[in-house]
Amino acid sequence: MRTFFKLIRWPNLLIVILSMSFLLFLLVKPGLGLAGSTGMTSGEFILLMIAVLLTAMGGYVINDLKDLKTDVINKPGKNVFETKFSVKQGKIFYWLFTIGGMLAGSVLSFLSGKSSYALIFVFTAGLLWFYSTRYECQLLVGNIVVAFLSALSFGLVWLYELMALHIQSVAVDRHSLLLVNTLVLIYMGFAFLVSLLREVVKDIEDEKGDRQTGCLTLPVTYGVKKAKNVALAVNLTGLIASFAIQWFFYKHDFNVLFLFFFLVDLLFGFVLLKLVTAERKEHFSLLSLWIKLLMVAGVLSIGLFYFE
């Protein structure tokens, strides 16, 4: 059981659950002044989470299957298909998770009155497949795909909530709608930048194995130094964006969020300094953990909107 939870990356799934729940119940609904029964029902939201989580789990499985040769070099003994599960079992897991995710997304879309939106989940599953089989080893493409999918979970919550409000013919204050729109876009952008930063750092960490298996990632193609410069540029962009977000919170009297983002600024600054001095694989492994902590801080900040 422990190996199975390692396979599906349970800490990452927990972050997804928290981010989606915080966004809907602590930001969107309070921000629009909605009563508990207005908008998405609990059942619809659970279906959305199941669809997102199962699709992500399928993505993790296919990624581990395709990374098996590379992980033997980069992370010997850590890929579960090298030690605990067979490749055949992995393929069964992949199809169960992926088909389950697409079915949950299809049922949700049907209930929301937009059956065609089921294609979002088909597209996402396809993108994860192509990421693992083709894009992962292409220059920056795989990094951008993962960053986009990280931001997508925020967008899906907002999309399906808006559809539910439309079906229920709920009138929403225009100013509140604009504010919530802006906040959702802010967190989508935050998720994109932090995920992109982590993906580039992970590529630097795995440069040795990627080079030996012919994986044309950024550090393999242009060298670790230039890849590090890209990571520094993404990190600096994130830090500037964090200052801009903080200013936005200050202008709108979100005092708790304004103060909390000093921690986010500090984490971006710390990661920036560590990136400058990072040289060995262990340094980049530790950096990857710090970036995940930065992501968690961003997720936790969503919940603070409720207390403004």
Image: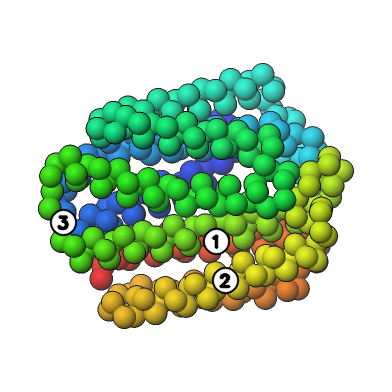
- The first of marks 1 and 3 along the sequence is 3
Quadrant in which residue 180 is drawn: bottom left
Q: CA distance from mark 1 to mark 2?
A: 8 Å
Which numbered dot is residue 193? Answer: 1
Contact (Cβ within 8 Å) of mark 1 with mark 2: yes
The structure's colour scheme is rainbow
Q: CA distance from mark 3 to mark 2?
A: 34 Å
The quarter of the image holding the C terminus is bottom left
- The first of marks 1 and 2 along the sequence is 1
Pinpoint residue 119: horizontal percent, then vertical percent.
42, 32
Contact (Cβ within 8 Å) of mark 3 with mark 2: no
**Other residues around mark 1 within 10 Å, as few (<14) / some (14–19) / many (≥20):** many
Vertical relation: 151 (above or below) 54: below
Q: Residue furthest front?
A: 116
**Other residues around mark 2 within 10 Å, as few (<14) / some (14–19) / many (≥20):** some
The residue that mark 2 highlights is 237
* Amino acid type for the residue under numbered disc 1: Leu
- The answer to which of 81 and 119 lies nearer the viewer is 119
Q: Is residue 161 visible?
A: yes
Q: Is residue 148 left or right of residue 107?
A: right
The residue that mark 3 highlights is 172
Pinpoint residue 169: horizontal percent, then vertical percent.
12, 44
Q: Is residue 171 left or right of residue 296?
A: left
Residue at 75% in and 55% down = 218
Pinpoint residue 174: horizontal percent, then vertical percent.
18, 62
Which numbered dot is residue 36? Answer: none
